[in-house]
Image (cartoon, helix red, strand yellow):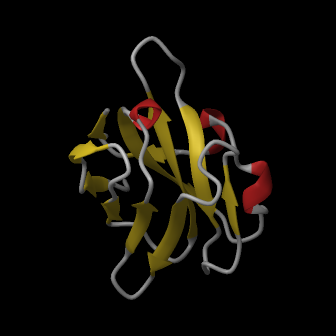
Amino acid sequence: QVQLVESGGGLVQAGGSLRLSCARTTSSYAMAWFRQAPGKERAVVAGINWSGSSTNYADSVTGRFSISRDNAKNTVYLQMNSLKPEDTAVYYCAAKPTRLTPIMVLTTERSYEYWGQGTQVTVSS
């Protein structure tokens, strides 16, 4: 059983930055960050393959967010810059045990098997 643990959420002003961490992953897993705002469905924000050589981003965060991983530390990160009030949501990390499936096709909740408990990100205007 994989137990992912997110951290790094908080309250930040618009234009600010936060870095989220997701611990207890492994190098055998593709990883992603999802977010869910009040009244909205959970949606993918960014994904990264097992080695870190391939990444994918939602259009709404391209150029502002960056996903990375440190397999030696079993941790995945989401660096969020130029934050906007519409980025306010609960952010979840998710894992899928695969080294073969391209990260570009792993864009739905059903693609992933393991989830963290979520961390709240609030961006004030």
- Residue drawn 72% across and 60% down? 103
Mark count = 0
Left/right of residue 121 with respect to residue 10 in the rendered view: right
Q: In this view, does 118 lie above or below 74?
A: above
Horizontal placement of 39 versus 52: left or right? left
Residue 49 in the image: above or below residue 4? below
Position of the C terminus by quadrant? top left
Report the residue at 33% width, 82% height from top.
73
Quarter location, residue 48: bottom right
Place of residue 109 in the rendered image (x, y in percent of width and height, measured from the top left) = 60, 35
Residue 70: x and y in percent read: 43, 82
Furthest residue in direction left, as rendered: 11
Q: In this view, does 73 lie to the left or right of 71?
A: left
Residue 104: quarter of image: bottom right
**11 left or right of 88?**
left
Task: Pick whichever, 48 or 122, lies toward us.
Answer: 122
> Image height check: is 62 above or below 59?
below
Write the residue at 59% across / 53% down: 46
Residue farthest to the top, as pictured: 39
Instruction: Please state the horizontal and vertical placement of residue 124, each as a whole percent of the image.
Output: 27, 34
Task: Give the residue displayed 44% in from the left and 37% down from the top.
Answer: 87
The x, y position of residue 1, in whole percent, is: 37, 53
